[in-house]
């Protein structure tokens, strides 16, 4: 399940995206669809939902308690106007889950999610959407973040552990 993704040998974490992940993504994307609305928004919500599912799965494996029901990405009204991909981690804060594709060398973090986040987790989705790979994260938002600039998943674990233990950390 672990794989290296660049020359620096950063560790990433692969997660299979099965029926449950796609059912959740489908429900989220259908909840915002209107006949006169652009289907690009529905596709974005679908991909965001898969990214949130993958990060939630990963954090639960590590023993972090998540609260997806408290996340804006689960709120149908919010999804009609915005496209958040947030995940609430109990007693720690909110992570934004940013999906990217195989061709991507950088990710874009929408300015609408530049506040009230403890970090931004980058998730590469396979072309078939059968697998998600958590590539790493960044603590601070930026219009564009190079994938080669990401902190590793190991750093994410340490960061969340420090936050859960009450360490003082500058998040940007």
Image (spheres, grey):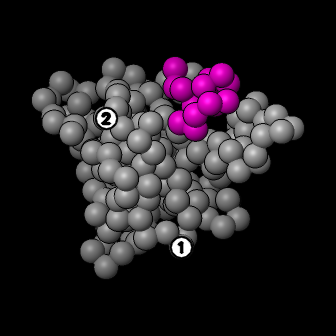
Instruction: Identify the residue at the far front of this view.
Output: 36
Is 15 a magenta residue? no
Report crowding for label 1: few under 14, some 14 to 19, many 20 or more residues within 10 A (C-alpha): few
Q: Is residue 51 above or below residue 118?
A: below
- In the structure shown, which secondary structural element does the residue marked by tag 2 occupy? loop
Q: In the rendered image, which quarter is residue 64 located in?
A: top left
Q: Position of residue 143 (x, y in %)?
A: 37, 53
Q: Is residue 77 magenta?
A: yes
**Place of residue 133 in the rendered image (x, y in percent of width and height, measured from the top left):** 50, 59
Name the residue tied to disc 2.
Answer: 118
Does residue 59 appear in the picture of this structure?
no
Majority secondary structure in the magenta region? helix
Cβ–Cβ below 8 Å for labels 1 and 2? no
| Residue linked to disc 1 | 103
| Horizontal relation, residue 40 to residue 85: left or right | right
Comparing 121 with 56, the one in front is: 121
Q: Residue furthest left?
A: 168
Q: Which residues are magenta?
A: 70-84
Q: Nearer the viewer, residue 65 or 52?
A: 52
Rendering quarter of residue 21:
top right
Mark 1 or mark 2, earlier in chain? 1
Q: Position of residue 8 (x, y in %)?
A: 27, 74
Residue 68 image point, x, y percent: 54, 27
| Residue 96 falls left or right of residue 29 | left
Would you say 150 lies left or right of 61 here?
A: left
Label 1 to label 2: alpha-carbon separation: 27 Å
Residue depicted at 38% across the width and 45% down the height: 120
The reply to whether residue 161 is in sight is: yes
- Report the front residue among 43 and 167: 43
- Residue 38 vertical placement versus 147 (above, below): above
**Quarter that holds the C terminus:** top left
């Amino acid at each position: 399940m672990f794989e290296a993704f660049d020359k620096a040998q950063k560790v990433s974490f692969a997660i299979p995206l099965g029926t449950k992940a796609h059912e959740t993504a489908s429900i989220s994307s259908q909840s915002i669809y209107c006949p006169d609305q652009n289907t690009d928004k529905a596709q974005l919500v679908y991909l965001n939902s898969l990214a949130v599912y993958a990060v939630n799965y990963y954090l639960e494996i590590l023993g972090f308690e998540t609260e997806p029901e408290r996340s804006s990405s689960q709120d149908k009204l919010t999804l009609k106007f915005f496209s958040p991909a947030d995940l609430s981690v109990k007693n720690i804060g909110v992570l934004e889950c940013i999906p990217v594709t195989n061709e991507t060398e950088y990710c874009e973090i929408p300015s609408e999610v530049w506040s009230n986040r403890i970090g931004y987790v980058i998730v590469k989705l396979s072309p078939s959407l059968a697998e998600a790979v958590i590539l790493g994260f960044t603590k601070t938002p930026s219009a564009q973040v190079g994938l080669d600039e990401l902190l590793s998943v190991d750093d994410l674990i340490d960061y969340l552990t420090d936050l859960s233990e009450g360490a003082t950390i500058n998040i940007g």
